[in-house]
Amino acid sequence: MKRLPLMKFKPTFKPMLLLIFMSALGVFPLDVILPSIPSISNHFNAPSSRTSAGIALFAIIVALSQLVIGPASDKFGRKRIFLYCILFTIAGSVGCTFTKNEDFFYFFRFIQACGCGGFVLLQAFVQDIFTPTERIKKRILLTSVSGICISLSPVVGALLETSFGWPGSFYTFAILACLIFFLGKASLPSSCPAPLFTGANGDTVQSANREKQFILNSTISALAFASHFSFIILSPIIFLESLELSLYEYSVAMLFYGLAYVVGGIIASILIRKISAVRQVTFGLLIIATGGSAMGCLHYMSGMSQLTVITCAIISTCGVTVVRPACTNMAMEAMPSKPGTAASILNTITFIGGGVISFTIGLFASGANWSLPIALFTLALIGLTIRILGPLKNPASLTESSHN
């Protein structure tokens, strides 16, 4: 009997699987834990406000730690730094489940947060492993995966809370982190590849141009992220308070919202074959503005409803999924000599900038039926202004001019 040949995966299959798991696990420590806040507060006999503040502090520690981890990975090697970070996250997560003291709980959350800063190396790994033509495609996929996981996180968190109590999310995180550790150990290159372009040829003008493009793309990425995160922040107020949906109905609405990342990923994948990355950013920002303006018009004509909010939010988020991979790719290509450092700065600008904007919008949550559409339209308009006045340039034009 003739034996069939064994299936062989491409060399990049395991690393890509690792990056997908990293995108999924990155939402766990913040989003999945949210349904467990009351249980954690009761367990330690602490007010919920303090537990919620602890989550905000966790995000700040992650943001600060990644500013150290990114540059360290350029100097000492990304694989080694990343694996140490994963061990920290596992130790911190397991430690949280065993402690009976609130102070020790926050100590282990601090350790977990420091390790979670290692997820910033996601974009640096894309830069290391894939060719320039492959990177934008991979970033579109990873943005879609991350967005879907964020949308599903309330449902997953509620299921884990119901089945295993508040330690459920920490146990699940630790198990997935162990999987990522062994997958990273087996699939990542042992050291950082040599930089493709250092910009150290005495061309200070070219270096300044690259830095300018990096900042412009990072800023637009932050605006796009704020568009998505504003909806995430305001969605409980809109659906649970204003529209008086049940928790189950709210979860179903968020599941539908997750489809936006699938649709947006498909649109972005089509666009990269037809138009430049800069035009892709323009198109995505116009989609965000369309969703915001349509939501405002519908609220004015017929009042706010579940259908109008979720439909227009999906439209805007499709635009976010088009904008962010393109901006991320152009930002990373503008600073190719130190991918780890570039990834850490990009991530910090995106999440701190997006978080501050979203927090500001959240202050007007009582008028969410108007604050959300106005925010979506305004953020897109600011992004378009930066894109035109900047102006944004395709990475290829920077590379060509650097060799002239």
Image (spheres, grey):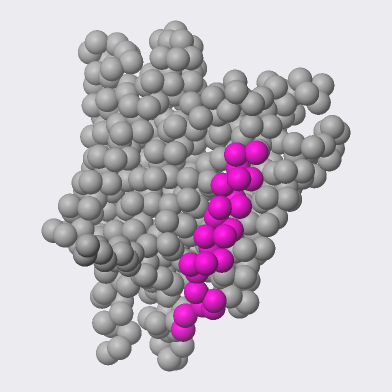
Residue bounds of the magenta highlight = 171-194
Horizontal side, residue 2 vs residue 324: left or right: left
Instruction: Give x and y (percent) for residue 50.
Output: 74, 28
Residue 325: quadrant of the picture = bottom left
Q: Is residue 161 visible?
A: yes
Name the residue: 36% across, 57% down. 139
Between 229 and 356, the residue placed more toward the observer is 229
Horizontal side, residue 102 vs residue 16: left or right: right
The reply to whether the magenta stretch includes residue 339 is no
Give above or below for 209 relative to 292.
below
Give above or below for 26 relative to 376.
below
Between 51 and 208, the residue placed more toward the observer is 51
Name the residue: 58% across, 75% down. 77
Instruction: Give x and y (percent) for residue 208.
Output: 43, 76
Residue lying furthest top in this view? 244
Residue lying furthest front in this view? 1
